[in-house]
Amino acid sequence: MNVILLTVFVGLILVALAVALFFYTSATSRGRSPEQDSLMPLEDEFPSAPQSCQRCLRELDAQTTFKR
């Protein structure tokens, strides 16, 4: 009998934790659901410069390279 009461008690604790975490995540989601976030493309850590700037960056790099 004690094992059944312990199992019910632990189950209720887990349900309460799940409900609390659900409300916490829904309150802090900023209007977006996890499904929307999972469909978003990954952001580049270092976004590349536009094609027109690539040539300028190469020229700048060639000018600032120290020659021995």
Image (tube, grey):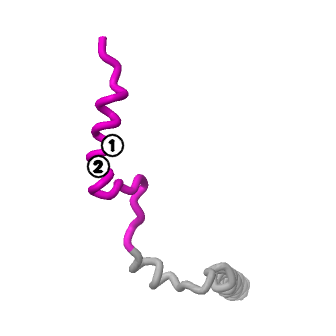
* Label disc, if present, on residue 54 of the rendered structure: 2
Real-space Cα distance between discs 2 and 1? 5 Å
* Image height of 3 relative to 50, above or below: below
Read off the residue under disc 1: 57
Tell me which segment is drawn in magenta.
Answer: 41-68
Residue 22 visible (yes or no): yes
Task: Report x, y in % for residue 5.
Answer: 72, 87
Please say whether residue 34 is one of the residues in the magenta stretch.
no
Does 47 sit above or below residue 66?
below
**Pick the front one: 55 or 19:** 55
| In the rendered image, the vertical position of residue 54 relative to residue 15, given as above or below | above
SS at circle 2: helix
Q: Residue at x 45, y 84 (%)?
A: 35
**Circle 1 crowding by C-alpha within 10 Å: few under 14, some 14–19, many from 20:** few
Amino acid under label 2? Gln
* SS for dot 1: helix
Nearest to the observer: residue 4 or residue 52 = 52
Pick the quarter of the image with the C terminus: top left
Task: Give residue 12's position: percent from left, percent from top.
Answer: 70, 87
Front-most of residues 18 and 11: 18
Evaluate if marks 2 and 1 touch, with contact meaning CB atoms under 8 Å apart.
yes
